[in-house]
Image: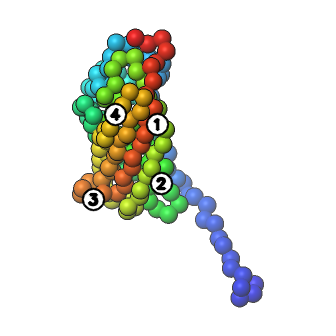
Amino acid sequence: MTQTQTETQYLAPSAESTRSRTFTWADPAIGLPALAGRSGLELLRAMSRGELPAPPVMHLLGMDGIEAEEGRIVVTMRAQEFHYNPLGSLHGGILATLLDTAAACAVHTTLPAGTGYTSLDLNTKFLRPATVDSGMLRCEGTVISRGRRTALAQAQLTDERGRLIAHATSTCLIFELPGVV
């Protein structure tokens, strides 16, 4: 081997280092009839009380719960090893999903029954890495402005010590849900 060549050795995972994770979720179609006649705030509060199943993504990522009020929502999630990227910190996509969830659900709290929404954009700023040492992550979403067809919301993600990890703004499109009254 010459001085310019390097040898890369891959260490195969051993039985002691291999991790496994199992999770369950409710059929998301079960909650669809609950959309009828419920405002976004009523729907999210029913989920937080356990009266309606949480969306599968909350189970996939290990989100712990939600607190909802008009124009504001808090979503929590413990930083865990299965969220890691190759650099030993939480993957930015995981953090962006938390931010998108909080910003969009804040908009959802302002919507009447029979009205839906979807994110049009998500502008995210990562300020510091998050690791398992970050503990319980708290993501607070608030509505900045809501019109008839669009809404602007923001979300702030903090660690257990209250340090800001990431911030995002999002625009949501508001529309009538077909067949839901």
Rendered image: mark on residue 163: 3
Of the pair 156 and 27, the residue shown nearer to us: 156
User: In the picture provided, is 136 more to the left or to the right than 15?
Assistant: left
Question: Residue 57, position in %: x, y?
Answer: 45, 35
In the picture, the quarter occupied by the C terminus is top left
Q: Which SS class for mark 1?
A: strand
Q: Do the residues labelled 1 and 3 touch (CB within 8 Å)?
A: no
Q: Note whether residue 58 is visible.
A: no
Q: Mark 1 points at which residue?
A: 119
Question: Residue 78, position in %: x, y?
Answer: 34, 47
Residue type, numbered disc 1: Ser
Residues packed near mark 4 inside 10 Å, few (<14), some (14 to 19) or many (20 plus):
some
Q: Do the residues labelled 1 and 4 touch (CB within 8 Å)?
A: no
Residue type, numbered disc 3: Arg
Of the pair 87 and 19, the residue shown nearer to us: 87
Q: Which SS class for mark 2?
A: loop
Q: Name the residue under label 2.
A: 91
Residues packed near mark 3 inside 10 Å, few (<14), some (14 to 19) or many (20 plus):
few
